[in-house]
Image (cartoon, grey):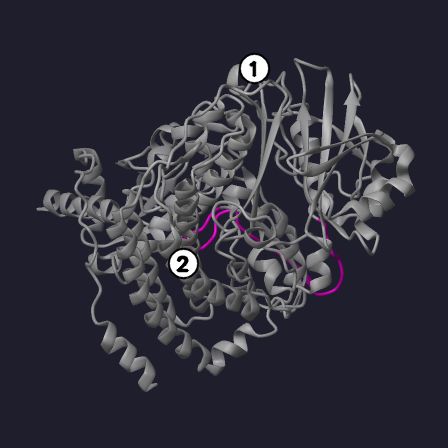
């Protein structure tokens, strides 16, 4: 018990100790901002992998660690698309994942937004043209926000998400 | 080759008639067999007490357009000296049939199904002829790795349903899980049959993420495919790119400078560290013990940020190159690395003491998800999972690559095969990796880090390489085509071998323990599905 308390005291607060993203995220369109309006300061995300190399998943997981602690910005990660406001999709859409992706989109209650995370989700990246890849996410479901990178770093994802939140709040005024 | 001379002689004495040709490539004895004799020779290799060959890799090559034949290659690791032995056989002309070795060698099961899907070659006598990679909606006759199948074919959609093995009886329920899971993880389908809580059967239905990686390799030049290798499985960026580069280097017959070899070992150990740290935390998190998860997440993040500072990539992308490494580190940077690890190690050791003092954590981990040594050996399981089940194999020690011949890594070995053993292997390897990095800083020589490349190799020559990534053995086989093009690239992530084994490890456990067992394996879906 004392060991745990001592460890916590010794470690202190680590949140925010990361290099800030220097790239500016892709601007959020007015349509996407409008769609974010209902969510205001809280966004519940369901992550869907449709064929990524799992680096994007690792960075999404990193968002939840104490250093980035995405929950402090009101971003919550849900276990089911039925509880989600936003879908974060990673990877090119493979032939085998096309149907599950469309199913997930259908299962997510309206209003909803879709975020394409990483180069593969946006333009298929290295896997463009392969027989096993059916195209970028946009070909199958409407995408509202793009977060490029291979993979985008957690601070870049964080920046894009807070931009989205700010836009949503602004247009709500 | 001298080491396994005795075993080879025995094999020759027993099956001399079957061996059409004997040669050695990269020190690996290669026996060319008559097609019909492969199962008996493989069975002999597998079961003979002085050979005890475990199937490490089984792959096929379509030799068209140069020659009208398919070639099947079986790579065995002999248990005593850990030497490799390669069996090959040809399917001439329009021959599409070969005898399956799965009835005797369990480890061949997925490989042969994969070959059937990708090449349309039929393994006769295979106990499970369902599709593996191609899901049921793929049209009939589409075999992507055949040379007459275009890489950018647009597939039509057919109808069909995968037939899961069913257990019937009073009170038996099926629980389908996936392909989209509750956590931030990759897609895969698990079908449980349960009676009450205990799992009676688990069937893994994967390959949702199949992206056609091996076919994409064939569209590239030998020296250009490193970025693709880095993206086979993102968490094993260095492992895969290093294995690929070493394979191409063996093909081009270039010698990598010593300093580059040391740097490769350094980056591989950094990758092992951040993944193991993350896994230890994730295993604790799956027992609802959030504190170590937070601490491990923090420590893992420190290594990822260190990677970023050193190379400009949190995943060490763009570091490995054919012929060496793309980035040289200064003495100050190496000192920085060691200083960072000097801070992380005591921090982590404190956490370890907290973990070991927690009885309820131990209670959850012990005897959960036991993979027995016998089952592990039957499936030729490797890496962390194997070493937790008493399979004493580590490429870093058995077939040293990069700078491991001068670093002599110690191999963590446990025999219980439960979740706790798999966690302990990781804990030991974290300390060992830190020790290795300290040694690397001490021993690294000065010199260049990139070597000049030679001309493209002759078409038809092949290269082979094995790397002990953080998950286990990564194998690459690359065959050169015309003008430096890749003719065939076989990628084997350890996940492909270890996934079937998880079906046995969960038996008798309760479903709520499955995420914990799965996490303790922590296999890649991307590396498996390719």
Residue placed at 55% from the left, 30% from the top? B214
The label on residue B482 is 1
Q: Work out which residue is located at the far bottom of the displayed protein and give it.
A: A2
Q: Is residue B179 magenta?
A: yes
Residue A78: in sight, yes or no? no
Q: Circle 2 sits in a helix, a strand or a loop, which is it?
A: helix
Which residue is found at the position 48% from the left and 55% from the top?
A: B407
For the point 43% across and 42% down, the residue is B258
Front in this rendered view, residue B424 or B81: B81
Secondary element at tag 1: helix
Q: Quadrant of the N terminus of chain B?
A: top right
Q: Which chain letter goes with mark 2? A: B
Q: Which residues are magenta?
A: B165-186
Q: Is residue B227 left or right of residue B478?
A: left
Magenta part mainly helix, strand or loop? loop
Q: Chain of mark 1?
A: B
Label disc, if present, on residue B439 of the rendered structure:
2
Give x and y (percent) for residue A26: 20, 34
When asked about the image quadrant of residue B292, the answer is: bottom left
- Residue at the extreme front: B446
């Amino acid at each position: 018990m004392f060991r745990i308390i001592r460890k916590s005291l010794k470690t202190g607060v680590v949140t925010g100790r990361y290099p800030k993203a220097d790239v500016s995220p892709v601007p959020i369109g007015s349509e996407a901002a409008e769609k974010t309006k209902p969510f205001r300061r809280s966004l519940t995300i369901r992550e869907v992998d449709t064929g990524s190399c799992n680096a994007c998943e690792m960075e999404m997981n990193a968002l939840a660690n104490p250093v980035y602690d995405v929950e402090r910005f009101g971003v919550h990660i849900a276990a089911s698309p039925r509880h989600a406001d936003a879908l974060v999709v990673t990877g090119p859409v493979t032939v085998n994942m096309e149907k599950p992706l469309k199913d997930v989109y259908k299962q997510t209650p309206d209003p909803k937004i879709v975020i394409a995370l990483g180069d593969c989700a946006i333009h298929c990246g290295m896997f463009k043209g392969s027989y096993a890849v059916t195209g970028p996410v946009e070909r199958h479901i409407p995408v509202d926000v793009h977060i490029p990178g291979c993979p985008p770093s957690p601070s870049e994802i964080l920046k894009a998400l807070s931009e989205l939140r700010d836009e949503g709040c602004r247009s709500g005024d | 080759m001298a080491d396994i001379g005795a075993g080879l002689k025995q094999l020759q004495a027993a099956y001399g008639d079957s061996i059409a040709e004997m040669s050695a490539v990269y020190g690996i004895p290669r026996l060319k067999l008559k097609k019909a004799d492969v199962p008996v020779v493989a069975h002999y290799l597998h079961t003979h007490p002085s050979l005890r060959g475990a199937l490490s890799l089984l792959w096929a090559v379509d030799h068209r357009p140069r020659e009208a034949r398919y070639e099947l290659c079986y790579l065995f690791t002999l248990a005593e000296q850990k030497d490799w032995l390669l069996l090959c056989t040809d399917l001439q002309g329009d021959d599409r049939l070969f005898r399956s070795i799965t009835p005797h060698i369990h480890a061949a099961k997925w490989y042969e199904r994969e070959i059937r899907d990708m090449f349309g070659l039929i393994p006769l006598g295979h106990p499970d002829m369902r599709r593996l990679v191609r899901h049921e909606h793929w049209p009939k006759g589409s075999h992507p790795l055949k040379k007459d199948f275009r890489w950018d074919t647009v597939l039509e959609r057919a109808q069909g349903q995968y037939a899961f093995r069913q257990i019937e009886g009073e009170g038996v329920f099926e629980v389908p899980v996936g392909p989209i899971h509750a956590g931030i993880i990759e897609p895969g389908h698990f079908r449980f049959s349960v009676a009450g809580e205990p799992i009676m059967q688990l069937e893994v239905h994967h390959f949702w993420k199949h992206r056609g990686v091996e076919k994409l390799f064939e569209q590239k030049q030998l020296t250009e495919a490193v970025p693709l290798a880095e993206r086979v499985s993102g968490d094993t960026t260095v492992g895969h790119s290093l294995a690929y580069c070493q394979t191409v280097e063996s093909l081009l017959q270039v010698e990598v400078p010593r300093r580059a070899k040391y740097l490769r070992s350094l980056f591989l150990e950094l990758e092992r560290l951040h993944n193991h740290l993350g896994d230890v935390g994730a295993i604790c998190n799956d027992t609802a013990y959030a504190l170590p998860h937070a601490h491990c997440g923090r420590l893992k993040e420190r290594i990822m940020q260190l990677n970023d500072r050193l190379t400009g990539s949190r995943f060490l992308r763009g570091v490995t190159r054919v012929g060496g490494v793309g980035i040289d580190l200064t003495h100050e940077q190496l000192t920085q690395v060691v200083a960072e690890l000097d801070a992380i190690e005591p921090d982590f050791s404190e956490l370890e003491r907290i973990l070991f003092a927690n009885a309820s954590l131990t209670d959850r981990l012990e005897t959960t998800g036991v993979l027995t040594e016998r089952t592990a050996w039957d499936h030729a399981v490797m890496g962390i999972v194997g070493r937790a089940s008493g399979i004493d194999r580590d490429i870093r020690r058995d077939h040293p690559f990069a700078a491991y011949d001068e670093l002599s890594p110690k191999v963590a070995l446990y025999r219980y095969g439960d979740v706790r053993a798999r966690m302990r292997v990781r804990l030991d390897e974290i300390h060992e990796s830190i020790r290795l990095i300290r040694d690397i800083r001490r021993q690294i020589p000065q010199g260049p880090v990139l070597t000049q490349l030679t001309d493209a190799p002759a078409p038809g020559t092949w290269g082979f390489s094995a790397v002990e990534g953080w998950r286990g053995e990564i194998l690459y086989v690359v065959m050169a085509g015309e003008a430096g093009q890749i003719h065939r690239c076989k990628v084997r992530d350890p996940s492909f071998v270890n996934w079937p084994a998880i079906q046995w490890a969960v038996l008798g456990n309760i479903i709520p323990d499955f995420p914990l067992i799965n996490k303790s394996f922590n296999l890649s879906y991307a590396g498996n599905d390719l």
